[in-house]
Image: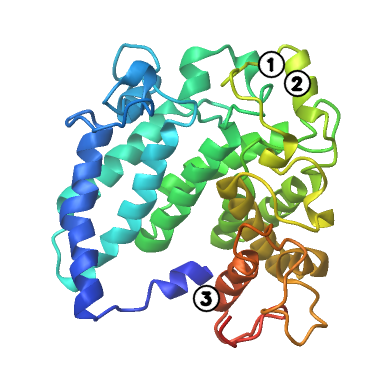
Amino acid sequence: MTNQAQALNVNITSRFWTRYLNMTVENALPYQWRALNDEVPVDVPEGAAWGENGSQFSHSLRNLRIAAGREEGVFSGQPFQDTDVSKWLEAASYALRRKNAGLNVDELEAHVNEAIELFEGAQDEDGYLDTKFELDLPAEKRFKGLRWSHELYTMGHFIEAAVAHYEVTGSKRALDIAERVANCIGHNFGDGEGQVHGPDGHPEIELALARLYEATGERRWLDLAAWFIRVRGTDPEFFDEQDAAGGPQFYTDLHMPLKYFVQDEPILDKQHAEGHAVRLLYLAAAVSKVGRLLNDQKMLDTVCGPTSSSTACTSPAPLAPARSANPLALTMICRTTWCMERPAHPSPCCSTASP
């Protein structure tokens, strides 16, 4: 049983939180499903289109149906459009536990199963799973434009959803899909000849693979997560070289520095937390989790600060954010990742004192 699965055994009885948990099951998740299914328009602010050309509809489930051969049509939306369904699937899977509190989750469970069926149908034989590339681009373009393609980010979110579903239901249907995804990634990435020797422009797969390891016990997924952490920033020219080689281009009007992608230097050598907030925090959470699982002191020191310090949780870690940010942000990630998962085993890099 994973640490997250153990946490699922906690029964929340607070009237305050029960109200919001029930609201999530009865209102929020059903509404989101309808939005993902293009049954309701979404009020998108001007200039921040959800899909293409200012569309007020998601097209996320429709993309999966097309890729699964259930509908005719073309891909619509952002390169990472599939993640809207994966994130919904993760939340909905955890919400199925409200059945134990007496809620009727039959309709929600039916939608969860439908989403898994769509992902299963959309997956290529080699395990690849990303409808943007499956519907819009030739196979030889896969993993060739990683600066902005979000391929591993997209697959990582499905892996996390599959782990959540397995933890709650015990069913391996989604988990089997996730392992095929991970096999595809492991085949294509690494230090071997013909493999891709660099990371995705948007960290997430690192955390997903670590969670897949926890769910399956397969050490190769943890080793692959560690590889992605260690390879990031080792070749600052990686994205430019992919672009020069004819890799697919996205967001060509955006010219972001390598720090934005946390790709300017090896993450374990960094002394300051700089970059796009979401990317940086996904990566820091992964470094903390993988560091704990591997007992890798350098990883733990990177996000938590030197363990020799008696004030590790109150002094800035090597990845302490810049002056404009909360200097304890990444230390809190270490605390959360470790202490919530291992309450009986205090973190070697964070004390139990309040920050």
Count residues near mark 1 (Cα–Cα under 10 Å), then give few for <14, some for 14-19, many for 20+. many
> What numbered label is drawn on residue 29?
none
Q: Is residue 63 above or below residue 279?
A: above
Task: Name which residue type carries label 2.
Answer: Gln
Q: Quadrant of residue 269?
A: bottom right
Residue 163 location (% of width, % of height): 47, 54
Q: Which residue is mark 2?
A: 242
Considering only order in the chain, which callout, 1 or 3, is on the residue closer to the N terminus?
Answer: 1
| Residue 72 image position (x, y, % from top left) | 31, 11
Q: Is residue 216 left or right of residue 12?
A: right
Q: Is residue 262 visible?
A: yes
Pinpoint residue 170: horizontal percent, then vertical percent. Answer: 39, 60
Give how far apart the Cα atoms at labels 2 and 3 are. Answer: 39 Å
Q: Is residue 92 left or right of residue 181?
A: left
Disc 2 crowd, CA 10 A, few/some/many (<14, 14-19, 20+): some
Q: Mark 2 or 1 closer to N-term?
A: 2
Task: Give the residue displayed 71% in from the left and 31% down from the top.
Answer: 188
Looking at this view, is 323 or 210 the one in front?
A: 323
Q: Are marks 2 and 1 in contact (CB under 8 Å)?
A: yes
Mark number, residue 340 = 3
Q: Is residue 20 above or below residue 80?
A: below
Query: Could you tell me how far apart the alpha carbons at marks 3 and 1 are, in whole angstroms?
Result: 41 Å
Residue in the image at 72% along x and 78% along y: 349
Q: Determine the residue positioned at 32% across, 26% down.
A: 46
- Using the image as rendered, state which of residue 73 and residue 297 is in the foreground: 297
Query: What whole-number distance in Å separates the C-alpha atoms at marks 2 and 1?
Result: 5 Å
